[in-house]
Amino acid sequence: MSSSRIDALTQWAAQHHGLDSATIRLSTAGGDASFRRYFRLTLPDGNTQIVMDAPPAQEDSAPFVAIGQRWHAAGLPVPYIHASDLDAGFLLLDDLGDTPLQATFTDPARTEQSHLDALAVIAQLQNRTNPAALPDYDAALLGRELDLFPEWCLGRWLSLSVPDSWEAVRDKLIEHALAQPVVSVHRDFDAMNLMLHDQTLYMIDFQDAVAGPLSYDVISLLRGRYCRFSADQFASFVGAFYQQARQEGRLTRSVSEETFLAQCHAMAAQRSLKVLGIFCRLTLRDSKEGYLARLPHFLAHLEDSLAALPQHREFTDWVTGVLRPAIMQRLEEGAP
């Protein structure tokens, strides 16, 4: 980030507070897989806020602002947006501290409770918001996400042919997703996007929210980057969410717990395939580091969910017998 942009960011933040830029201080507060960067603004009285730098040439912050305002008005735990300059790509937000949810994964009992707490936030999101204002997570978008896997993981990174079973799997996973009730979906409800502040879990990075399948955020959480749960643990979490969704009317009596669990496994397979493609794209196209090392974790997630979907046995066998050895060999060779 250029010094001139930091100067502009500092002046903008100071101007919002009616202060001289020399009286405030910015310190780095992190970044993510996008072009966004975050800074902690320290005011003369010691209070802090977060300044988001989202260069408009690479990042459109309008959805983040619009969604954040709606969700905050609905009483959801999201950072308050104090100011925004979309033309410059500057936003001023609540400071939610430095404790993402994964920092609480210190022992099995605490990890389990943290995931149950996060599932409760998903229920709040689905209960309190109308998904109609969000883009549709339709067959076209689901398909584009799935297609990242053969293009970037198989073709560009591994130089592997697409298996004959791919098209049938692709179509079936989309069908499973579209069969579910449509709700507001955060779309990256991973532990890293949940901040623990004053004993409350807050959602961040919700700019890609869509109107989509009931199970999607559940899967983002349970098949995320920090934990790998056993089949029984996964079913227990899904069962707890299912019972609450039934009680609150988000799921009808016609959907059995067994059916919903199968839909969750299909949704998890879709997301794992997408992530394998995205991580390869981040590496090859965007020169981002560290993502290839995470491929085995999400490959294991894929295998776990495919094991619960016996109708995809041919594709499952290909994943185990061809894809896994190819990925592990490339990593051992020091890919890319």
Image (cartoon, grey):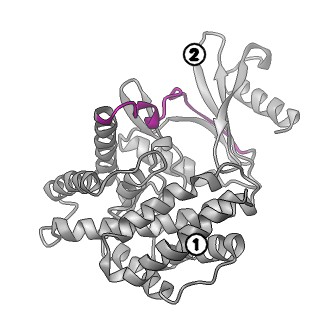
Q: Position of residue 188 (x, y in %)?
A: 49, 53
Q: Position of residue 151 (x, y in %)?
A: 65, 76
Q: Amino acid at mark 1?
A: Phe
Residue labelled with disc 2: 47
**Residue 89's mark?**
none
* Residue 102 appears left or right of 13: left
Q: Is residue 328 visible?
A: yes
Q: Quadrant of the C terminus?
A: bottom right
Compared to 295, does 140 lie above or below?
A: below
Q: Looking at the image, which is closer to me, 331 or 312? A: 331
Residue furthest out toward the top: 45
Q: Position of residue 191 (x, y in %)?
A: 45, 43
Q: Residues within 10 Å of mark 2 (few under 14, many from 20)?
A: few
Nearer mark to the viewer, of 2 and 1: 1
SS label for mark 2: loop
Q: Looking at the image, which is closer to me, 184 or 141? A: 141
Report which quarter residue 172 is drawn in. Answer: bottom left
User: Residue at position x 46%, y 48% from top?
Assistant: 190
Residue labelled with disc 1: 149
User: Residue at position x 40%, y 77% from top?
Assistant: 173
Task: Please provide the residue range marked out in magenta.
Answer: 89-108
Q: Residues within 10 Å of mark 1 (few under 14, many from 20)?
A: many
Q: Can residue 177 be found in the magenta stretch?
A: no
For the residues labelled 2 and 1, the Cα–Cα distance comes to 45 Å
SS label for mark 1: helix
Q: Looking at the image, which is closer to me, 37 or 258? A: 258
Q: Earlier in the sequence, mark 2 or mark 1?
A: 2
Q: Amino acid at mark 2?
A: Asn
